[in-house]
Amino acid sequence: MRRREFIAGLGSAVAWPVVARAQQSDRVRRIGVLVPYKENDPDAKAQLSALKQALAELGWADGRNMQMDVRWAAGDVDRMRVFAKELVGLQPDVIFASNTPVTAALQRETRTIPIVFVVVSDPVGEGFVAGLPHPGGNLTGFIFTEAEMAGKSLELLTEIAPGVKRVASMFNPDTAPGGGSYYLPKFEAAARSLKVVPITAPVRSDAEIEAVITTLGREPRGGVVVMPESFLLVHRAPIILLAARNNVPAVYWYAVNVKDGGLLSYGPNVPDIFRRSASYVDRILRGEKPAELPVQVPTKFEMVVNLKTAKALGLTVPQSILLRTDEVIE
């Protein structure tokens, strides 16, 4: 079944009687949380706050009837695995997993403790669920985006920087969905349609990030699409700095990249996904099974553009983009 074919039926699936919410157990429930970012990342902290606030609105207060054990992996796959084992060992009532490698690490450790994932792009392909309407196991959650978005990102790059002729798809094979293969076919198909030369650019370190962007900047008309995954988000500062220094226009999926100085972003609103996911944590704590909770798709997208960065790159942001932008950074 295609993802959008079951969206209409989610309204009834998400509903939960008010009277049931009022029925609290005296037992303190334990929620494990594994986050792939640095603990001092303000954007990641805001996402976690959105989850906590939404849980509080559903009757779950940290320190009163709920204990939240949070681990921060700082974009390191090895840390994700260590913390996954540690959290499972605590035997929580439910585990909240943010992104694909985090969810994979947790799935390796338990097939019984309920897991609610967010910011996962291909849960069926990754083997997390049997299907979107009927997950069938101990995992369910909220998809980040579909592979077609890679083509959309490239279209936006050619729209805001019409001179680009060579564009790299940058990703870390250790943390990107499908090792990077999930987005590449759509990216390459869009490149053929737009008559742009696609470049596959796997990176695993700041040095490799620098090599890719510096090479793109050595000749005019180079650009980069920064794929959505935790390693590149954790390492966004050097990416933004190198793109500016080498005069390379870049498009991102997370708004925080543009707020930190990047050119343009388009993608799902991540805090909104975190807020929505609280409903599934709540329902599992009250006895429902993840196998019966359909995987949901994003409902709120946002585009952010940085005019200062565009000017520094010698670009004029077209009206077609400005009219669609949710936030303009001066």
Image (cartoon, grey):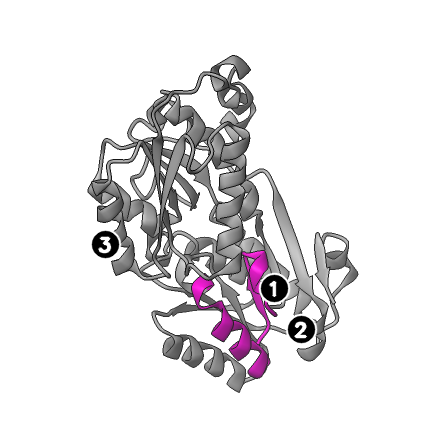
Numbered circle sitting on residue 258? 1
Which corner quadrant holds the N terminus? top left
- How far apart in space, not on screen, are marks 2 and 1 (Cα)? 9 Å
Q: Find the distance from the CA under tag 3 to the CA under tag 1.
A: 32 Å
Disc 1, SS:
helix
**Residue carrying label 3:** 82
Which comes before the other along the chain, label 2 or label 1?
A: 1
The residue carrying mark 2 is 309
Determine the secondary structure under disc 3. Answer: helix
Mark closer to the chain start, 3 or 1? 3
Residue at image point 22% right, 47% down: 85
Asked whether, in this view, residue 108 is left or right of residue 26, the answer is left
**Position above or below: 203 against 21:** below
Tag 3: amino acid: Val
Q: The residue under label 2 is which amino acid type?
A: Thr
Q: Which of marks 3 and 2 is nearer the N terminus?
A: 3
Please provide the residue range marked out in magenta: 233-261
Tell me if residue 253 comes above or below residue 279 in the rendering: below
Residue at position x 29%, y 40% from top? 127
The answer to whether residue 203 is above or below residue 247 is above
Q: Position of residue 154 (x, y in %)?
A: 56, 61
Q: Which of marks 3 and 1 is in front?
A: 3
> Label 1 sits on what residue type?
Val
User: Which is nearer the eye, 57 or 196?
Assistant: 57
Residue 90, percent from left and from top: 24, 40
* 152 falls in the magenta region: no
**Residue 204 at x, y = what percent?**
34, 69
Q: Circles 3 and 1: CB distance less than 8 Å?
A: no
Residue 97: horizontal and vertical position, in percent?
37, 44
Do callouts 3 and 2 mark residues in contact (Cβ within 8 Å)? no
